[in-house]
Amino acid sequence: MRTPLPHLRHSAAAIRVGVLGWLGVFSCALLLLGCSRQAEPQRPAGYVTAPQVSLRDRLAAVHNKVAVLENGQRVEILETRSRMVRVRTARGQEGWMEARHLASEAVFRAFRQLAAGNVSAPIAAHGSARAPLNMHVAPGRKTDRLYRMNEGEKIEILRRATAERTLPQAAAEQPPVLEDWWLVRDTRGHVGWVLGRMMDLDVPLEVAQYAEGQRIVASFVISHAEDEGRQVPQYLLLLTGPRDGLPFDFNQVRIFTWNAGRDRYETAYRERRLFGRLPARVTREKFEKEGELPVFILRVQQPDESWEERKYKMNGVIVRRVLPAGAEAPPRKPR
């Protein structure tokens, strides 16, 4: 076996030192890169509240459009100047926009919690947005808002609340004005509070015309009547007075049945002076002598302020209260 020449041994050692040196430099570079990334401050997030916002490349009057942001879109806030903010999108686009069109991360989380807390909430009624409509995190015009519904967008109505409307300074001595707000779910699954007067309830026109100036708060198909081979729906309507801020969701019940001989709807049942809260339920139930009948259940407050569920059955055009076993029929109130 031959012994390597001295100059070759020196070359090999130099190569090893050179490789180790480069590996050390490369490792240090990676370490510094990692440190720089960790050292980069975490930017606050914002969420677009307007239907659309143009992102511009500079604050000057003459500027270029960088991107168009959509309602609910998340951005990273890089810099704030007066009423403008510089943001970065998830695609890396950077530009300036008005700060008033952004909601904070806390507002976004509040909306997410509101949606999660109402996943199983019963639907009280269905409706649609009368105009482009803001969703608020709580009842009230000055509460935080984020999502925006389009005109005509369908909504699921969950429950009602009232909030005091802020009056101008000149009207400060007037009594408070209460407005109705409804918790709704839109077609994208967002949940929020909307001003009641800015939505329309889904009510068939053929029975809505008989509201007699009252406000319909819920409508249900309770049964069908046969008329020359077609099934005509019959309706349960819950109504209240035509003003906001009432302490109940509804105080009147009406059943509309179809008169095939006269080809029109007629009132088969009416009850007033209730103190009712939504939601109401419509189902079917079997009765010993009458068979399976349509049933509706209302949540009503008693004089002692306790709540009870009242059950009603409908046999043909006759509606009767279903009382618990052993209970006596309450006296009929005058109309």
Image (spheres, helix red, strand yellow):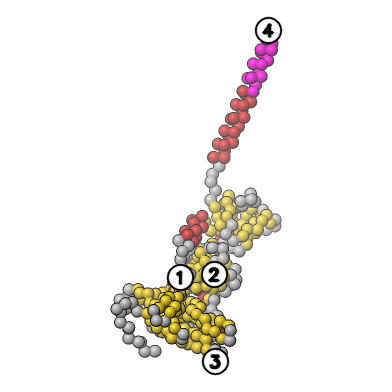
The span shown in magenta is: 1-19
Residue 8 sits inside the magenta stretch: yes
Q: Residue at x 60, y 26 (%)?
A: 24
Q: Can residue 198 be seen in this view?
A: no
Q: What element carries label 2?
A: strand
In the image, which is nearer the foreground, mark 1 or mark 3? 3
Which of the 4 image quadrants contains residue 294? bottom left
Q: Residue at x 53, y 79 (%)?
A: 203
Q: Check residue 2 in the rendering and tell me which mark sits there, or answer none.
A: 4
* Label 3 sits on residue: 261
Residue 32 sits inside the magenta stretch: no
* Label 1 sits on residue: 159
Q: What element carries label 4?
A: loop
User: For the residue marked with disc 3, what is the amino acid?
Assistant: Gly
Q: What element carries label 1?
A: strand
* Label 2 sits on residue: 155
User: For the residue marked with disc 1, what is the amino acid?
Assistant: Arg
The mark that comes first in sequence, 3 or 4, is 4
